[in-house]
């Protein structure tokens, strides 16, 4: 690794230490379906978002709920405060495309139809309300 690249990598690592987040890779759900859930909880208070995820009928909401609980736990460990006292909000949620498994399905006359089994990567950022207003 070049010196200039190493310096910029160290800067981004230091900037990331101040953020409170949780990341889940290779979730076997299409990114389009997961983005519906992500849009639902983005910018909402944490307790309200947990309630929305718990009672959602979507299958992928349970994975998003576990990830949000992990992000809350990361915030509690880094700050030493309780989540109820912090007025936490979901500051950002990003859903990126993961790997795609390509499969073949038998089709008439000896052909094969391609099936793409998509996956995604989810990152949830959590922050307190008073930190969000300073920026």
Image (cartoon, rainbow, N blue to C red):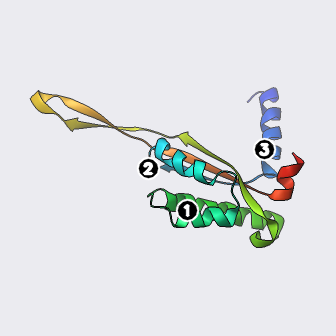
CA–CA distance in space, label 3 to label 1: 31 Å
The image shows residue 130 at horizontal and vertical percentages of 86, 57
Question: In percent of the image, x 44 and y 48: which residue is there?
Answer: 29
Q: Callout 1 environment at 10 Å: few (<14), some (14 to 19), or many (20+)?
A: many
Q: Callout 3 environment at 10 Å: few (<14), some (14 to 19), or many (20+)?
A: few
Q: Element at badge 1? A: helix
Q: Callout 2 environment at 10 Å: few (<14), some (14 to 19), or many (20+)?
A: some
Image-based side of 97 in relation to 133, left or right? left
Image-based side of 54 in relation to 43, left or right? left
Residue 4 versus residue 72 in the image, above or below? above
Question: In percent of the image, x 57 and y 63: which residue is there?
Answer: 52
Residue 28, label in figure: 2
Q: Which of marks 3 and 2 is in front?
A: 2
Mark 3 and mark 1 lie on one chain; the one further toward the N terminus is 3
For the N terminus, give its image quadrant: top right
Residue 114 location, quadrant = top left
Q: Which residue is labeled 3 in the image?
A: 13
Number of numbered discs overlaid on the protein picture: 3
Image-based side of 8 in relation to 97, left or right? right
């Amino acid at each position: 690794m070049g010196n200039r690249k190493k310096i910029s990598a160290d800067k981004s690592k230091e900037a990331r230490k101040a953020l409170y987040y949780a990341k889940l890779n290779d979730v076997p759900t299409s990114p389009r379906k997961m983005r519906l859930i992500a849009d639902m909880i983005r910018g909402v208070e944490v307790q309200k978002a947990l309630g929305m995820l718990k009672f959602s009928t979507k299958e992928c909401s349970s994975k998003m709920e576990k990830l949000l609980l992990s992000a809350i736990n990361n915030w509690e460990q880094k700050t030493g405060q309780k989540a109820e006292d912090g007025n936490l909000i979901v500051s950002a949620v990003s859903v990126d495309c993961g790997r795609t498994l390509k499969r073949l399905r038998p089709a008439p006359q000896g052909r094969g139809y391609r099936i793409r089994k998509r996956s995604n990567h989810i990152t949830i950022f959590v922050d307190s309300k008073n930190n969000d207003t300073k920026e």
